[in-house]
Amino acid sequence: MFELRTYTLSSPETLEQYATIHWQRHIDSLATHGVTTHHVWKRVDGDLHQLVALVEYAAGADPRAVTETYMGSTEFRADMDGFPMDAIQGVSSVFVEPASSDPTV
């Protein structure tokens, strides 16, 4: 199952820090929890400072349970070390699957 996660950050600086340091760490730690990161993007238009990540959960995994376990893990805490958590102003999520017209199907 694929999930598209959007993080809204408080400033261009916190977006850059989250994208270059903390999400880089997440890629490896998420993998230890069965989550593959396919893409990490930064929004380039508008006034919002957003990071968008496309991740994939292992077959049969419960994404909510995986996320809860991951966010309670020592790996997650280490990933976020040095980042002000209040700089994340919001997180939204949508689960997606490829349509039959997707060129990678």
Image: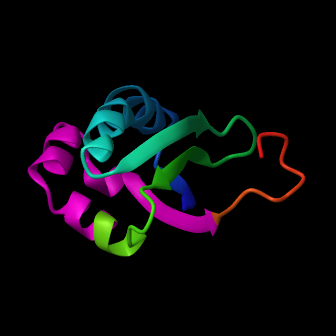
Location of residue 13 in the rendering, given as x and y in whole percent from the top left corner: 44, 31
Q: Residue at x 70, y 34 (%)?
A: 44
Instruction: From the viewer's side, name the closer residue of 10 and 18.
Output: 18
* 36 left or right of 40 in image: left
Instruction: From the viewer's side, name the closer residue of 22 and 90.
Output: 22
The span picked out in magenta is: 67-95
Quadrant the N terminus occupies: bottom right
The colour scheme is rainbow
Tell me, yes or no, if residue 8 can be seen here. no
Location of residue 77 in the rendering, given as x and y in whole percent from the top left corner: 15, 49
Q: Is residue 12 magenta?
A: no
* 34 left or right of 70 in image: right
Instruction: From the viewer's side, name the closer residue of 87 and 24.
Output: 24
Location of residue 26 in the rendering, given as x and y in whole percent from the top left corner: 32, 40
Location of residue 95 in the rendering, given as x and y in whole percent from the top left corner: 60, 67
Instruction: From the viewer's side, name the closer residue of 65 and 74.
Output: 65
Tell me, yes or no, if residue 4 can be seen here. yes
- Hey, which quadrant is residue 59 in on the image? bottom left
- Hey, which quadrant is residue 66 in on the image? bottom left
Q: Is residue 70 magenta?
A: yes
Residue, far left: 74
Q: Residue at x 66, y 40 (%)?
A: 43
Residue, far top: 20
- In the image, is residue 20 above or below residue 72? above
- In the image, is residue 75 above or below residue 3? above
Q: Residue at x 25, y 41 (%)?
A: 29
